[in-house]
Image (tube, rainbow, N blue to C red):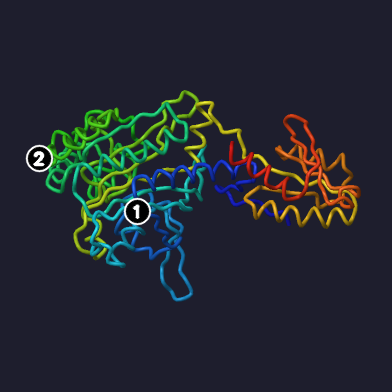
Amino acid sequence: MNYKVPRGTQDILPSESWKWQRVESIMRDVCQLYRYEEIRTPIFEQTELFTRAVGDTTDIVQKEMYTFEDRGGRSMTLRPEGTAPVVRSFVENKMHGYPDQPVKLFYEGPMFRYERQQAGRYRQFVQFGVEAIGSASPAIDAEVIALALDVYERAGLEELKLVINSLGDTESRTAHREALVAHFEPHIEEFCSDCQSRLAKNPLRILDCKKDHEHPLMASAPELPDYLNEESAAYFREVLAHLDAVGIDYVVDPNLVRGLDYYNHTAFEIMSTSDGFGAITTLCGGGRYNGLTEEIGGPPAPGIGFAMSIERLLLALEAEGKEWTDKPALDAYVVTLGEEAEAKGFALVQQLRRAGVTADTDFLHRKMKGQMKSADRKQASYVIIIGEDEVAKGVVQLKNMETGEQHEMTNDDAIAHIAQMKKEG
């Protein structure tokens, strides 16, 4: 039988995985600057966590979750998103009692959704996200948005657009909900079955429907900003004022709704404006979720966060023509000729590595020409040659692959020279 990678997943080969490592390094560096600390949660959780937190009317819960029954008869689900598990951990581990609030966390890892595969979208995908839990300040909303933009900009993206909206508090959303029901109900039979079921449960989700997004009633639907009470409107103005203060450009879109039920107040998306990126432009989405900790059994702790796909970040870089090509080079390749030289060379490779120098050697007993070609393919900065003469004299030949210069020296001198050149640049 020929085995193949499961549909909607991918193998990330060494020719590409170094780019992922570069992105992950950028994300971790930015989080370090902002003092967000890593949290790692299980890949699967109790199914009820997602049905309660994400919402049983969402596409994720209704259509996309990988759910299974374990040997104990419990319903478990591979995590489709990262916020609910982080908030569950926040509640379970009583992080609300930490002296420093808000608690600032980041996560990175695989998520799972059964959806149609598209460019940059997979059934197993890698998501990076942050959660700031324990503050209702508009300033933390702006900080979370700034962090997301910093990641993209440090990665090299330039063609970005921040779209933001306010979903309001419970009172505002209730007033808007009633207006939506009155607007859609007389013609709801013209909409898909999903929208028909959403009308009673969560009419706001109708606005996010992919099937009926061109229906005329969508364009004329009541807009959330018109139903914000003064408290919600004032909060949103403060968020925008903080973005203005740090020079972050944005577009207020009254029709922006997020696909998860737990959002309220601030909601935002970061999009690619590159012509070559494709029809689905969203790179990152997030928002505030006051009330989520109470929903899963914890004390009140307002929060805000975002999630971004590493696959789509790399796709956006490619669309802007900024795909990384500078794969980390090999510092030194040890070429050996003869059994005694091979043993000496193997020991030297280990000495180089202990000195912080990346090093490799031949394991196929190739002739010198073949070994030199391998060193060239690996883009080695230096080649160290050990033959019978070098073994007898206790020296090596050190060749600079860029200049072609070659010098005879001791093992220790060769190691010191390469380490110093690497340190200098």
Identify the residue position indicated by label 2 in the image: 229
Viewer-proximal residue among 308 and 281 = 308
Secondary structure under tag 2 reads loop
Say which of marks 1 and 2 sits in front: 1
Q: Earlier in the sequence, mark 1 or mark 2?
A: 1
Number of marks: 2
Percent x, y of residue 351: 70, 55
Secondary structure under tag 1 reads strand
The quadrant in which residue 153 appears is top left
Judge from the rendering whether residue 377 lies leftward or rightward of residue 195; answer left or right. Answer: right
> Can you name the residue that lies furthest to the top here?
275
Viewport quadrant of the C terminus: top right
Category of crowding for the residue at label 2, using alpha-carbon neighbours closer than 10 angstroms: few (below 14), some (14–19), many (at least 20)? some
Viewer-proximal residue among 56 and 358 = 358
Residues at marks 1 and 2, CA–CA distance in whole angstroms? 31 Å
Judge from the rendering whether residue 164 lies leftward or rightward of residue 111; answer left or right. Answer: left
Category of crowding for the residue at label 1, using alpha-carbon neighbours closer than 10 angstroms: few (below 14), some (14–19), many (at least 20)? many
